Amino acid sequence: MESEESATGLSTAALVAIACNAFVAVLLLLLCLILYRACRVPSSPEMLPVLALSEGATQKMNEHKYLLTS
């Protein structure tokens, strides 16, 4: 006479462990997807970074440097 648990093959604890591992695998896949999208090289190089100075500001800085060194 076998118990009902051994007849099904997997205990409740084993099923809970499988479900938790599947959930962790989905979270890891999502993390890898986010990291892949965050680390990609920008596809359009003509876009300026947010902290980049405008052309007028860089030209003014170059003139200012020139005035200081002469």
Image (tube, rainbow, N blue to C red):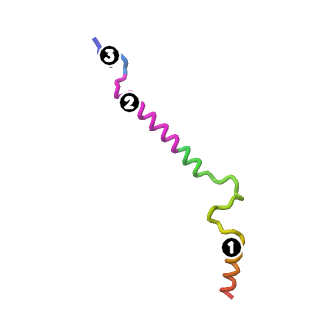
> Nearer the N terminus, badge 1 or badge 2?
2
What main secondary structure does the magenta stretch of the protein show?
helix
- Residue 13 or residue 1, whichever sits in front: 13
| Residue 65 location (% of width, % of height) | 66, 81
Residue 43 horizontal side relative to residue 38, left or right: right
Quarter of the rendering occupied by the C terminus = bottom right
Task: Name the front one of labels 1 and 3.
Answer: 1
Residue in the picture at 37% in, 20% down: 9
* N-terminal label among 1 and 3: 3
Is disc 2 placed on a helix, strand or loop? helix
Q: Which residues are magenta?
A: 10-31
Give the labeled residue for mark 3: 4
Does the stretch in magenta take in 24? yes
Looking at this view, name the residue that lies furthest to the left. 1
The circle on residue 16 is 2
Identified by mark 2, the residue type is Val
Front-most of 34 and 55?
A: 55
First along the sequence among labels 2 and 3: 3
Where, by quadrant of the figure, is residue 19 drawn? top left
